[in-house]
């Protein structure tokens, strides 16, 4: 039983970075929808890994794959403010449940022309993600870790005349969750030397470039995460995955095509070639997208 729980903890930590990802690089990008515009996307994501990165550059031969359905919505409250919602539903032999709901707000305080037809936009974002069901984080297939996170994010996007763009995104994520008494008791029963602590805050940095045209969009990106404080995976030693200090480098690409003014689809892929307390995850997602014009006065934006 202890070994089974131990393997499940590994798999749960492996999937930490996949929460809420309709787009492979996260729910907050450098664009706004426009007042009254609503995007609704239903996604299917396949993820797999065959290696697990431990501390001190150690690697473990642990295979895993998962299938996840996701809901993503973004609504233009005004021309400067969007609201975003994300919610994954995980289906496995041991877990079939909604998991961590993400609610975010995007605000663009600056959008100015820079030299002829080039533009610079600044977006600030925050929000809250939290579990909406009593799912078990340390079972095979759990996507979230019952984490409660408040992200503080800033996006700087340079848009050039023919639709190309460069995006710089940085974020600091506050972990406000704590280990439950039951989790502490279970961990100490399997590992008497375990001492409870607080989950570590983490930062993410991303560089992205691409092209946004009238009917299609694509991007390439590199994202880095660093967790401050936390515990490391150790072979045959049980620790709650909620405390893992997850670091990684992730490379990815996204593509969107507009079928008409109301429908489109998106494809995303990502791979983690290096990290700590995480697997070498490859993920692929497909998302049909519906655009709804609630104010009937504007044309949908990409």
Image (cartoon, helix red, strand yellow):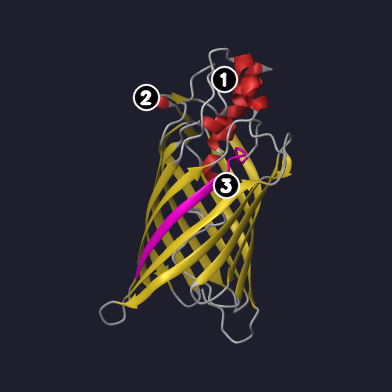
Spatial separation of the CA atoms under disc 1 and disc 3: 23 Å
Residue 110 shows in the view: yes
Choose mark 1 or mark 2, whichever is in front. 1
> Where residue 283 appears, x then y in whole percent?
53, 46
> Where residue 110 appears, x then y in whole percent?
38, 72
Task: Give whichever of 247, 200 is nearer the camera.
Answer: 200
Q: Which residue is mark 3?
A: 19
Q: Which residue is mark 1?
A: 238
Q: Which residue is mark 2?
A: 56
**Residue at point 57%, 47% (across, down):** 19
Question: What is the secondary structure assignment of the residue under circle 2?
Answer: helix
Which part of the image, by quadrant, shows the N terminus?
top right
> Where residue 125 appears, x then y in whole percent?
47, 60
Question: What is the secondary structure assignment of the residue under circle 3?
Answer: loop
> Where residue 90 appears, x then y in whole percent?
68, 44
Q: Which residues are magenta?
A: 143-158
**Residue at point 63%, 82% (across, down):** 295
Query: Are discs 1 and 2 less than 8 Å apart at CB?
Result: no
Question: Where 154 sits versus 172, above or below?
Answer: below
Query: Are discs 1 and 3 less than 8 Å apart at CB?
Result: no
Spatial separation of the CA atoms under disc 1 and disc 2: 18 Å
Q: Is residue 249 magenta?
A: no
**Residue at point 50%, 52% (across, down):** 269
Decide: few, some or many residues near mark 1? Use Cα within 10 Å; few <14, some 14-19, many ≥20: many
Q: Which image quadrant is residue 261 in?
A: bottom right
Question: In the rendered structure, which disc, 1 or 3, sits on the residue that comes first in sequence?
Answer: 3
């Amino acid at each position: 039983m202890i070994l089974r729980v131990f393997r499940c903890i590994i798999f749960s930590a492996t999937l930490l970075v996949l929460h809420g990802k309709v787009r492979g690089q996260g729910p907050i990008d450098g664009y706004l929808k426009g007042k009254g515009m609503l995007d609704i996307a239903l996604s299917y994501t396949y993820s797999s890994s065959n290696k697990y990165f431990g501390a001190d550059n150690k690697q473990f031969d642990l295979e895993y794959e998962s299938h996840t359905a996701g809901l993503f919505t973004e609504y233009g409250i005004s021309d400067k403010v969007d609201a975003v919602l994300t919610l994954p539903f995980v289906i496995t032999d041991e877990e079939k449940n909604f998991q961590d709901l993400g609610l975010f707000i995007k605000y663009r305080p600056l959008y100015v022309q820079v030299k002829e037809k080039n533009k610079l936009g600044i977006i600030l974002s925050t929000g809250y993600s939290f579990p909406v069901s009593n799912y078990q984080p340390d079972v095979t297939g759990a996507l979230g870790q019952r984490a409660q996170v408040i992200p503080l994010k800033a996006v700087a996007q340079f848009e050039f005349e023919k639709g190309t763009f460069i995006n710089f995104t940085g974020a600091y994520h506050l972990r406000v969750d704590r280990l439950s008494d039951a989790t502490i008791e279970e961990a100490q029963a399997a590992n008497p030397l375990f001492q409870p602590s607080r989950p570590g805050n983490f930062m993410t940095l991303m560089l992205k470039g691409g092209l946004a045209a009238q009917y299609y969009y694509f991007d390439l990106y590199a994202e880095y995460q660093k967790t401050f404080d936390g515990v490391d995976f150790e072979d045959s030693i049980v620790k709650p995955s909620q405390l893992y200090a997850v670091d990684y480098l992730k490379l990815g690409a996204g593509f969107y095509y507009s079928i008409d003014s109301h429908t489109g689809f998106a494809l995303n892929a990502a791979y983690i070639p290096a990290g700590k307390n995480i697997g070498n995850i490859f993920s692929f997602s497909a998302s049909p997208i519906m655009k709804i014009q609630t104010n009937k006065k504007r044309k949908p934006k990409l």
